[in-house]
Image: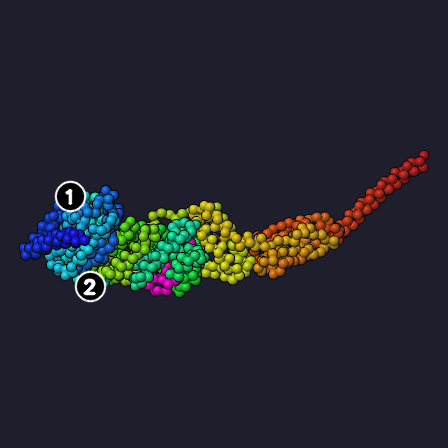
Amino acid sequence: MKNISENMAKTKKSFMTQSNSTRGLTASRSKLGALFFMAGLVCVVFCQIMVTPKSVSLKTNFSATSNDSSIKLISQSPFVNPGQIFNLSIQVDTSTPLSNLVVELTTYMKLSSRSSFDQSITNPYGVVSSTGGMAVGQYLVGQSSPAAINFSVNLLAPGLPTPTTQALPSEIPVELGVGCQYSTCPGIYPLKVSLLDPVTRVQIYSMVTHIVLAPPDSPPTRLGISLVMPLLNQGSSPSSSLNEADINSAIGELDEVAADFSTPITFTIDPSTLVELSNDKSKSAITLLNDLKFIGSNSLHPFVEEPFSNINISSLANSALEQDVENQYLSGSVTLKSILGLKSLIPAYVGTDDLSLKGVSKLVSFGISTLLLPSSSLRPSNLRSTATQPFGLSNLANSSSPICLPLDQGLSQDLMNSDPVLGAETFIGEASQVFFDAPNSSYVRSLSVLIPPSISSKATVIKNLLSGIANNPLLEGVTLASSATSPQGVLYNPSTRELVPSSSPPLISSESFTNFDTARSQLNAASSAYGAIFENGQYLGPNAVELNSALGDLYQAEALITEPGPSFSNYLSSATSPFKQIQSEISLSPNPNITLTSPTGKIPITVIASPNSPILNLELVVSSNGLTFHSPTTVTLTLDKAQNTVFFTVTARARGSVPLTVSVKSPDGSVILMRDQLTVHSTAISSVGVLLSLGAALLVLWWWFRTARAKWISHRGKHSKKKVAIDGQ
């Protein structure tokens, strides 16, 4: 232990000697004049820029993978004021023996724009200061890979005050220049942490983070950050189901939100998923549901209005199913409020896909007043800085354009980093860079950011993100509602932008529409048979639970209508279950034969209801070409007992057997629930038949009489002529 302590003391002394040398150099530079220092620094930076390619790469963590080594960020100061120590903790996982580990810290020129920030993530340029290779093995005694390394960084520049805080024994003291003078120092500085080969001192892995150096005085306004966080997102397929991992992950995320309850977050959750969660009686599901209710009770954590299922709004708005967009939203709102006990919802659309103008008009027609739109669906603006103000849509025919906010996709992408802590800190750094676009702005600016549902270690990201916003003097968390109502800027943002979807909405095939419409008609028939009513996108009244369960399946099928498959068919089949249930509960009298013993009589039609069947309201319709009906052929029928008989007065048009068609329909007659054909036997001659028979007999007698008379007259004439001839002789 004594040797270890001595070695650590020697190592710390060597770093402190280096620090003292740097401080002395800084003092001498101050004496010679800051002007000479800055001139030399500019020259160095210029040379560095000239030899460094400025290619803009995708926003991914820069690394030169080798030697099975990696660096992850444990924590860092979200910001520092002039004269404060910047603390940095990293985790190193390497096959190199820790006793031989060599680390280098390098600072770069202050960033001038957001585009330069994006470039610095993968390829920082303009080196200002470097520690060179530092053998840190003495600080890692007793650790095994992955090992934690803590740095205490003193930032040096002409005019910056000297920190009074001393490094802790477990921290490695480092001094780095930041290439500025006091009044120009506030800004964002890339900091690269590199692992070097212990022999060749060649970089084998590196990580880039950012130092946020805040101004000494509080700014007039801070940049608002409106976070929108999807919960229990199951991807684009509504057919996927919740699992234990999804639920436990969401519990962890909400625990981090509750730990920092002062930073606003707006939540979105699919109502159909919430229904599934509420039906899950597992311990974890109950815990999550209670957490959601608790979070929703805080006004800083509102929920957004959502359609019941993940429908393609533009596709439905462009088809005969346009009204279903509103019905889906109405049903989703009822579901969210009833399950979570919410009093209100944010009337906003959070877009991750293209939205057509017709889709926008439909949303506005039933009260969606705020749209969060991805930049990919907007025509590029001529802004030289990030858009931070609401805008309207210039090409919307309806004059009442909704308030639109751009979703900042760059900040969302920061959070996709495989290192969750580094992703959150990169977010804080980039948002702070947006603040420095207009650091002295007197009007409110804000950014709306959708937290990607697919990020790894989401709870860790949320924890560091909320902490970084809450503790940053340049940023503040704001609600979505306040972002949508903030006054429009007069310098940096136009009042309108043009919506230009990058693709057309998927089409709904005629076959899919027909199958869907048939299922919906059958469900509506079942609801009217039960006596339920359709209101606010859901059923109320008798058998509402069963009907709304089937309606939920119908809504889920609608989310798949543009790409039908087995799940689409399965949902439609489930949606018609109440209809099929009614079909199984009713039947006609088992005797299919009916006999009339007189020309005119009453035909009994008996509809039988199963013992457990609720009261049903139906329509009974009869028809036959061989019968004349003296009573209405359509009768409203209420099945309130086991056997329900209706009599129809008819006259048989002929003796013998005639078919009789019996149909049981929905109350409005639009859907047939059951159809059967009975046989009616007539054994009596009808009065019409008798009259026809007598008429035929009289006609025959008359014909016979005339024929016989004609023959008699003809015979008599011949006899008279013969007698005259005899007499003449």
461 is higher (above) or lower (below) than 297: above
Report crowding for label 1: few under 14, some 14 to 19, many 20 or more residues within 10 A (C-alpha): few
The mark found on residue 218 in the picture is 2
Return the x and y of residue 289 as percentages of the image width and height: 40, 60
Q: Which residue position holds label 1?
A: 51
Q: Is residue 706 visible?
A: no
Q: Quadrant of residue 96?
A: top left
Q: In this image, 577 relative to 61: left or right?
A: right
Q: In this image, 707 relative to 228: left or right?
A: right
Q: Secondary structure at mark 2?
A: loop
What amino acid is at disc 2? Answer: Ser
Return the x and y of residue 651 as percentages of the image width and height: 70, 54
Q: Which residues are magenta?
A: 292-310
Q: Secondary structure at mark 1?
A: helix
Q: Nearer the viewer, residue 666 or 222?
A: 222
Residue drawn 66% across the image and 55% down it: 605
